Amino acid sequence: MSTAVRFQDALPIAKQFTKTHYEALGQEPPILIRDLYGKIRLFLRGGPTEQHQDLAASLTQSLGNFAYSAEAIFLYETDFFNSQSITGSPDKILIPGTEPPIFLLDKQITSQDWLRQPIKELGQHPPRAVLFGIKGGVGRSSALAIWARHLANLGKKVLVVDLDLESPGIGQILLPQARLPDFGVVDWLVEEAVGQADRELLMDMVATSPLAGNTEGVIRVVTAAGGKEQDYIAKLSRVYMDINQEGKIVDFAHRLAQLLQQLEAQEKPDIVLLDSRAGIHDIAAIAITRLTDMAFLFAINTPQTWQAYRYLFSHWQKWNVNLSAFRNNLKIVASMVPELGREGYLSRCRESAYNLFSETIYEEAEELEVFNFALGDSSAPHFPVEILWNITFQEFNPQSEDYFIINGAQLNAYYGNFLQTATELVLGE
Amino acid sequence: MSVFPVDAIRKAFLALPESIDSKGVPIDKQYFYVPASHTKALHPDNVLVEGIRGAGKSEWWLELQDPERRRLVADLSPRAELANIECSAGFGLARSDNYPDKRILSSLLRNTDAQTIWLTVVAWNILLEDGFGLAKDSLWPEKISHFQSHYEELDRRLVQIDKHLDQHGKKHIVLFDALDRTADDWKSLKDLLKGLLQVALEFRSFKAIRLKIFIRPDMLEDPYVYSFPDGSKIISNKVSLEWNKLELFNLLWQYLGNAPQGSKEFRDVCNRMFKQKWKRHDLGIWMIPEEMRRLESVQQTVFHELVGKWMGTDAKRGNTYTWLPNHLGDGYGQVSPRSFLAALREAASEEVIKDQKFPLHYQAINKGVQKASQIRVEELKEDYRWIEVLIGTLKGMNVPCDFEAIVDRWKQGSIKEKLQSIDGEGVRLPPSRLEQGYEGIQKDLIVLGIFQPMLDGRINMPDVYRVGYGLRRKGGVMPVK
């Protein structure tokens, strides 16, 4: 008995098949469609020919359980009333390295956003940065709070948005319970779906953090949930769906973009900081690749951290669809760097990060102008900007502004490098 | 827009030297700049001065022999205490009657130990023909045997001169440079180095007679050369000629502030916009303003107005002020000043891009660094002929890579045979650890800062060499044309 065709085998088989029979299948570029189960069909531009029957049977046989039946495995454009949903799909991508071209339409329940184009927005938006960790618990939210305070100290108006909808937190760091706004991000998503995202709602979504009280600037905070939230899970379970907005289907990513635009129009911040969901989640995908100007990728130097990042980076490398649109925006943050043996830790971390980037998304070349950086180039995306770990910050809960005044010197020693680099990268100052 | 007038400043940049130095001709005095740390190296009491290829060893060897230059340095940097000294050459690149050349040394070594040879050279330099007691055109074997047979007498004369010099507050320094040109094999070279260091130690008991030895770090690497009683006294007091970021930019200011064209505009803007007032020295040289010389923040502000703040359209491609020295550093981050100046000179000779806001464009800086990389490779070739043989065969490879992949290339290119047949004039020394095989060669290349070992054992190469030798950097995707 032959071995089973596994998920990852099916697509290469189908690709090879298409390449071999390219002419017989019709001249126009064919599109491989992989459905939610991973089963594959082939969309052909012309109509059926006699030869196709045999070809269909052979493809069906070679794909095993990931095949459709021979009668259904070829889809013909002529059979469709409107084939635009396939030929014009935003998720249709050219399979890298195929000549003549073969396209893929990969239908996924989630994660489609990792390869989609940046969202086209009308007009300018203030600089946006997202803080992301492939694993949680690496001090991402603390860093965000301290950075926000630093920016306020520089006289900036900072808008912080908690996009960690499935485990919210940044709001609690920046705002005391009594100061939480009435509504949160989930409220807007639910209300907007029924056409009720009005001005009042938007105004009641933002609160001022007392942590920037005496600074020249201000920190305005949008939390995931409102202060008197009772129905969080019921709301959360409804936020990711596409909605029908006056006859147009709008997906979650575009809705998030709309929310940000409206908040920015209302608040007029100098900078927007997004606290992203950890892990390979759609919110992270949207925030990193489609919405922001800068994505700080938090990492601690463990094999599981780099392996998790590698799943993501390899996905980008494999499909290489719109890498150039966001790869410049990435910067590794080495968080929780131990004080003892700091130098050694950082050089190990730097090398791990370098290997990740250079084996996946850096461009291979001789010249200096391409997207590729030397191991020791401090301006490189892989070159970690460090945050030192100290027991003082273990239970980070500033509560009042005094915290920053009392611990100022220490914060500067442990976070200084990050604060300076991050500010420079996003604001250019 | 830059606060500097673009055209005028671009002309000033053209005063920077373009390529390899013309041997034996010192730099024009208006471009002469002494980094603060080098002042220490020039002080007569500092015997051993180390510096990588291009750090300025031969330049100093030359400058110190010129009384007018010495006066200038003494004036600019009083701490060097060069006001009342005499200098002569005990070895160097140029041919001279003051010292034996490589061939003579090689035959002398057959019958004489290195220490005696150098002692004779020093005595000949200090005593001159009358004091030494031989005619100017006498041969080196004659000088050696004369020195040996009249040792006590000559030694006494040296002591007298030392006393005399000291009473008049003077010093005499015998200068040594280009010591890699004293022998064609490492055994003889190391013997000669060891002998020279022993002689240098002997003269520590003198008050006014001193040796000053300019040497490359890789030549001091084998402890053999200083393994003699009190050898550590010499080695642990060595000083380094290094060029840190601050000093590299000072060198640039020196050129821009004294260039034949555009320098007035440069100085005027420094004064008007950054409150950095240039003053003129009696010798007609414009002197770098204090803050511009000492503060990175001021240097950065000025440089940003010359080339823009970023190496691209925004901060993501890095700060130009740090980017440039970073990309010219070897495996230890050391930058040769010539590469630095060459990169900027090349950038200034690139065509102006439409709507260029600053005198130099970041794209031109990028090109300049590639050019500087080629120049660095040429520069290195003069001191280490074997590097070309070894790294030349790696052209087109991707780094970082496993060392085994490099060895495979070397085997295919039969480098062992090629290394045997390096001949002709100049330095013919092979890699110092050649007997240890490929591992030894690897070690040599690491010591020279050309190979950079990674933590996982793979070999990387800094850009300044990688680009010049035509290697590629590994990547996961191919660039879009």
Image (tube, rainbow, N blue to C red):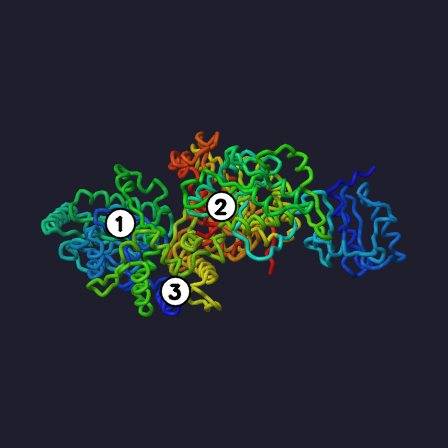
Please give the name of the residue rendered at 47% of the width and 53% of the height, measured from the top-left corner. B315
Q: Which of A421/A180 is in front?
A: A180
Q: How many marks?
A: 3
Give the distance between the C-alpha atoms of the residues marked 1 and 3, in whole angstroms. Answer: 27 Å
User: Hey, what amino acid is under mark 1?
Assistant: Ala
Left or right for A13, reference B155:
right
Q: Position of residue B301 (x, y in %)?
A: 37, 56
Q: Chain of mark 2?
A: A
Give the distance between the C-alpha atoms of the residues marked 1 and 2, in whole angstroms. Answer: 52 Å
Q: Position of residue B214 (x, y in %)?
A: 29, 51
Q: Position of residue B434 (x, y in %)?
A: 45, 46
Q: Which residue is mark 3?
A: B18
Crowding around mark 1 (Cα neighbors within 10 Å: few <14, some 14 to 19, many 20+) is many
Q: Chain of mark 1?
A: B
Q: Chain of mark 3?
A: B
Say which mark, if any, is on residue B41: 1
Q: Determine the image quadrant of residue A284.
A: top right
Left or right for A218, reference A361:
left
Say which mark, if any, is on residue A390: none
